[in-house]
Amino acid sequence: MTITPSALRRDIYRLLDQVAETGAPLIVERKGRRIRIVREEPPEGRLARLVPHDCIRGDPEDLVHIDWSDRWTP
């Protein structure tokens, strides 16, 4: 559905509820430009919220026995 900013201002709560319930995007057109209001789907499950991080893969014992003497100065 395409509406004007005045119509959005007049019925903003009803229109936002409609987008939330139906999932149909709402397009606001002003001066020839369009802004789309869409419902964001929540991630599924708790694990979907995890953020990937860099990590070290391998045997932890290998980290203990690394020779750092050529890079370290007292």
Image (tube, grey):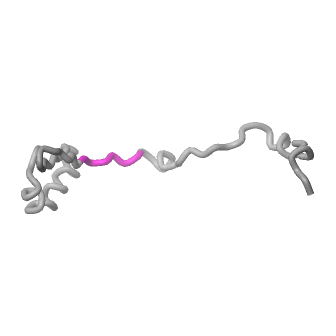
Which residue does the image show at 45% across and 47% down from the upper left? 45
Against 71, is 7 above or below? below
Quarter of image, res 5: bottom left
Magenta-drawn stretch contains 42: yes
Question: What secondary structure is the magenta-colored segment mainly?
Answer: loop
29 sits left or right of 48 in the view: left
Which residue does the image show at 60% across and 46% down from the upper left? 53
Against 64, is 9 above or below? below
12 sits left or right of 56 in the view: left
- Where does the image place residue 69, in percent across and percent down from the top left? 92, 46
In this view, the residue in front, 70 or 44, is 70
Quadrant location, the C terminus: bottom right
35 sits left or right of 74 in the view: left
Which residue does the image show at 52% across and 48% down from the upper left? 50
Magenta-drawn stretch contains 55: no
| Region of the chain picked out in magenta, as a range | 38-43
Q: Is residue 62 visible?
A: yes
Q: How many marks?
A: 0
Q: Is residue 65 visible?
A: no
Quadrant location, the N terminus: top left
- Where does the image place residue 9, in percent across and percent down from the top left? 11, 61
In this view, the residue in front, 29 or 12, is 29
